[in-house]
Amino acid sequence: MDRTTTEWKLSLNVRATILAVMLLVVGLGVWEGLNQSPLMGGGAELSEYEQLLAGADESAKVPPPSEIAVKAWQELSNPFYDAGPNDKGIGIQLGYSLYRVLSGYLLAALVAIPIGFLIGMSPLAYRALNPFIQVLRPISPLAWMPLALFIIRDSEASAIFVIFICSIWPMLLNTAFGVAGVRNDWVNVARTHELSSLQTAFKVILPAAAPTILTGMRISIGIAWLVIVAAEMLVGGTGIGYYVWNEWNNLDLTSVIFSILMIGVVGMLLDMSLAYIARFVTYAE
Amino acid sequence: MSHAFVEVQKAAKRFPGASKEAEPLTVFENISFQLEKGEFVCIIGHSGCGKSTIMNALAGLDQFSEGSMVMENKEISGPGLERGVVFQNYSLLPWLTALENVRFGVRARWKAWSDREVTDHSMKYLEMVGLKEVVDRKPSQLSGGMRQRVSIARAFATKPKLLLLDEPFGALDALTRGVIQDELIKIWSQDQQTVFMITHDVDEAILLADRIFLMTNGPQARIAEAVEIDLPRPRQRAEIVKHPHFYTIRNYLVDFLVNRSSELRTQEFDEQGLRYPTPVNPVQLEDAEATTDSTPASPATEPQENLVKFTPKEIRHG
């Protein structure tokens, strides 16, 4: 091979990294530059009006990245402190949210995967259940919240229920799709080897459909993480969604931006962990 | 009633017509044949004559519209471990390694065996097809020939009484095919299983078979003749072509596929009621013709001398 082309190929990752860093630096620089607080004490004497405003700018400005970095350092160096209901560390808040997301999500998996299996295996079940799925699926998960609060009478459980209801559909439909699409040849292998229905389900259909099921699970966890923020804003008390809203009420925009970043990072980690699990069940035909 | 190992009687496959008034489409009908224990039978015919349907019905994966199938005096209904199948598209489970695929079959066959026994038995058959080095690879990491070897190892390892091969070498290149044919002969001569195999390759059929069933063209296909291959065993690809009878048989088969499979309109067979394919021995037939120069020994066979020179490399249709 030509040496120069090899070098170009090798440098693709490096070039992408350089470009990403440049974008980051430029973006942060512009943000920083546009949102500087007015310089204090310099130049002319302050007017009485300016003195009243204590030197603040006339229009409120978004906190610059430097302030957020300082805030992030403070929060992340002590993430689990608990100083009362409205002052908990970011780690505790994220912990509450993750607990709700994971419990609602796992409950949904326990329901969706067996039902998806049934729908995928049986055209009768598919036709009978499809109308319900089609009506229930497009409902915004938050629309269930009042009903859940009324029936369950517990805000914690209602939040988990909302996560449950929003993560069930992608898993259900992908499982059904994966199971229905299992190659007939593989089912025939099970049949010619006299496998029982249960053995066929676990030894042939489940591994064959596993990549599609995992895709559904990955979509679901993403949606669940999107929904939990809104659900916690409604329910209140604890969690990252509540934290964002609470800091907004405190007009602490630095904390708001910091927590937005944390939501993004945790969402990415959730997605990456499912992508990691999916690697173990994917196969090439 | 039936004494043969496998007995198929008056089998037919019909599909309903496109509309209600339309006649149902008959792919084949009045198909009857017997397989003896330990026999290797190939079936040749053009695409659409229903070979695969017959095979799938024997495997229990498809059903005849009419007719009965009996194996060892028991009606065949549904698939079973006493009948092993090798499909053209290998049918390996892609998430399992070569060894795990064979283990899958062996484990299903002998549920009481220990893991050690299952692995040892599987390895034995994988070694027989020359795959000892690659047992831990997934099918996607194997070549087409290697995959088909795994598939054959899986089928033989479960020691079925009847082995069904649906064009197992159809997707392989000629060189690979030859090597695996030799391996198939080797593994078959050890276990002496009864084999029923679909092929499009005349040479392959002569190399492997004791008898070759010749099917007429569909619709309303029949098995017209059962050609006896009495070439001595063990046969080898390189040696068999030198045998004086090889081309007599080959030309007879090619002539059937090229000319007679479409000319034979086989309704007259039906008047005979339950009818097994006419046994034919092309070598004796030729001898008889040479001496008497009269009508052929069999009513349904009239090999034409001028066509015997036609020897294409192989016959593949559709």
Image (spheres, helix red, strand yellow):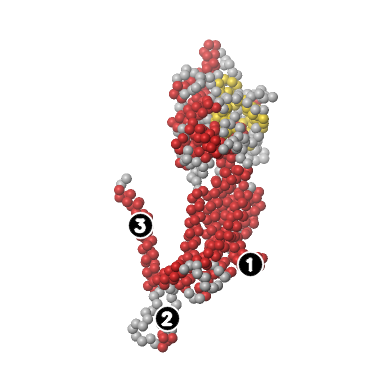
| Crowd class of label 2 (few under 14; some 14 to 19; many from 20; radius 10 Å) | some
Discs 1/3, front: 1
Q: Along the polypeptide, which appears first: circle 3 or circle 2? A: 3
Q: Chain ID for label 3? A: A
The chain letter for the residue carrying disc 2 is A
> Which quadrant of the rendered structure holds the N terminus of chain B?
top right
Q: Quadrant of residue A25?
A: bottom left
Residue B131, compared with residue A61, is above or below; it is: above
- The residue sitting at 55% across, 26% down in the picture is B192
In the rendered structure, find residue A15 and report the number of the disc placed on it. Answer: 3
Q: Is A85 in front, or is B227?
A: A85
Q: Residues within 10 Å of mark 3 (few under 14, many from 20)?
A: few
Query: Amino acid type of disc 1?
Result: Asp
Quadrant in which residue A183 is drawn:
top right
- Nearer the N terminus, badge 1 or badge 3? 3
Tag 2: amino acid: Ala
Residue at the spot x=54%, y=60% of the render? A223
Residue with the mark numbered 1: A154
What residue do we see at 62% from left, 35% from top? Answer: B80
In the depicted structure, whether residue A154 falls above or below residue A11: below
